[in-house]
Amino acid sequence: MIFRLASIVLMMIAASLSAVGDAYAISSRIKDVASLQSGRENQLIGYGLVVGLQGSGDSLRSAPFTDQSMRAMLQNLGISTQGAQSNAKNVAAVMVTANLPAFASPGSRIDVTVSSLGDAQSLRGGTLVMTSLTGADGQIYAVAQGSVIVSGFNAQGQAAQVTEGVTTAGRVPSGAIIERELPSKFKDSVSLVLQLRNPDFSTAVRVADVVNAYANRTFGQGIAEPRDSEEIVVQKPKSADLTRLMADIENLIVTTDTPAKVVVNERTGTVVIGADVKVSRVAVSYGTLTVQVNETPQVIQPAPFSDGQTAVQPQTDIQAQKTGGALNVVEGPDLQTLVAGLNSIGVKPDGIIAILQGIKSAGALQAELVLQ
C-alpha cells in the first residue's frame, strides 16, 4: 500500500512538472513561424521630386541636384529653362523606396516611402512627381506618384520652435503601380523551402514531423525534411496542387522552441527575460553610492561708508550616501522564481542589468546574454 501511494505521488509530481513545461510551450501555425523562400519581398528604390511645398523645400543654391533635376524634368515636358533662375523653395529632392511583394502582378498598387535628400524643412502638403522604381538588377518594376502624407509637424516663430515627429519623411499610400512582375513562377516549383524566422534545430524537426504526419494521412508518404536549423524542404507530391498544398501546410499547428536568452538595452533600461532562462543558486549584493554637491555662495557686503567692495564667498556642501550592500540569495529554476528573486533585491532596472551581467560572468546564468 505504501509503495502504491508513493508511485501515485511520483506520478502527480511528474504531471505537475509536465504541466509547468507545457505552460511555457507555445503552439503556433507554421505560417506564423516560417516563411516561403520563394515568397520573399524585393526592395525597390528611385529618385524623384516633391512639388507643391509651401516654402519648405530645398534651397536651390544649397542643393544643386534639386535645381538640375527640376530643369531636366521641365525640359522633358518641352519647357526651356535656359538662362532662367528660380529661388522658389517649393521643390524637394527625395529618395523613394518600396517593397515589391513576392507574387505581385502588374497593375496592383503598393505603398512607397519618401525621404528628403536636401535641406527641405518639411514635405507636408507636397506631391510626388512620377518616379520610376528599380530593383537590384536595374529593371523598372513600378512607377510612383501621389500626395505625400507626413505625420509630424513643425511650427516656429522668432523666438520659439515646436517640432513633433519627422517632417522630412512621409508615405504615399498605394502610390506605386507595379509595371513588371518577377520572372519566377510559383507553379513551376517542384519543392517548397520553408525558412524559420527564428532558426532552431528543435523547431525545424518539429515542423518537418508535423508536415510529414499530414502528408502520411493525405498522400501516404512523408514529404518534408529539415535541411538545417533554418530551412525545411517540402517535396511536391505528383498528385498535389502546389497552391493548395502550401495553404494546408501553413495552417498546421507546431510547438516552437527557442534558446534561452536575456536581452538587455542599457540605453532605455529595458530587460527582457525568456521563459527558459534559469539561474543557478548565487548570492548577490548590490549597493549604490550617491554623492550630492550643493553650491551655496554667500555675498559679503562691506561696511557702510567704507571703501570696501562686495565679495562672493564660495561655500560647498558635499554629502555621500551609500545604500544597499546586503547579500541576497537568488535562484531561478523557472521564470517566475527568477523575477521574484530579482525584485526582492529592490533595485531599479539599471541595477538589475548590472546584476545580470555579474551573474553571467560568474557562470550562473544559464542563457545567452544579448546586449543592445
Image: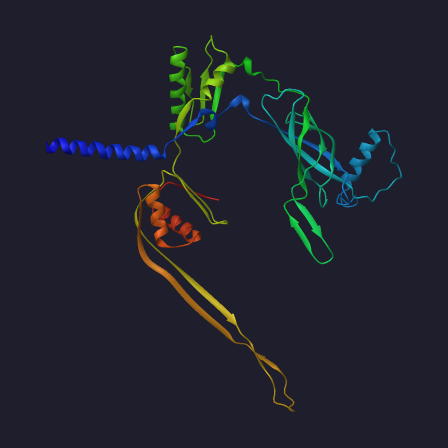
Q: How is the image coloured?
A: rainbow
Q: Give how far across and how far down residue 301 sits, in percent.
A: 60, 84
The residue at the point 65 percent across, 41 percent down is 151
Q: Is residue 54 above or below residue 137?
A: below
Examine the image and state in which quarter residue 60 appears. top right
Q: Is residue 311 above or below residue 138?
A: below
- Seen from this angle, which residue lies furthest left? 1
User: Is residue 116 left or right of 24 when viewed as pictured?
Assistant: right
- Seen from this angle, which residue lies furthest right? 83
Which quadrant: the N terminus? top left
- Seen from this angle, which residue lies furthest bottom? 305
Q: Give how far across and how far down residue 202 sits, in percent.
A: 38, 28
The residue at the point 53 percent across, 14 percent down is 189
User: Is residue 226 left or right of 119 when viewed as pictured?
Assistant: left
Examine the image and state in which quarter residue 326 appears. bottom left
Examine the image and state in which quarter residue 336 appears. top left
The residue at the point 39 percent across, 48 percent down is 356
Q: Give how far across and how far down residue 188 sits, in percent.
A: 55, 13
Number of labels in the image equals: 0
Would residue 19 be visible to someone looking at this image?
Answer: yes
User: Is residue 61 left or right of 298 when viewed as pictured?
Assistant: right
Q: Is residue 43 above or below residue 365?
A: above
Q: Is residue 193 above or below residue 160?
A: above
Query: Could you say which is closer to the camera, residue 33 or residue 313?
Result: 33
Would residue 364 be visible to someone looking at this image?
Answer: no
Query: Could you say which is closer to the camera, residue 156 or residue 318?
Result: 156
The residue at the point 84 percent across, 31 percent down is 75
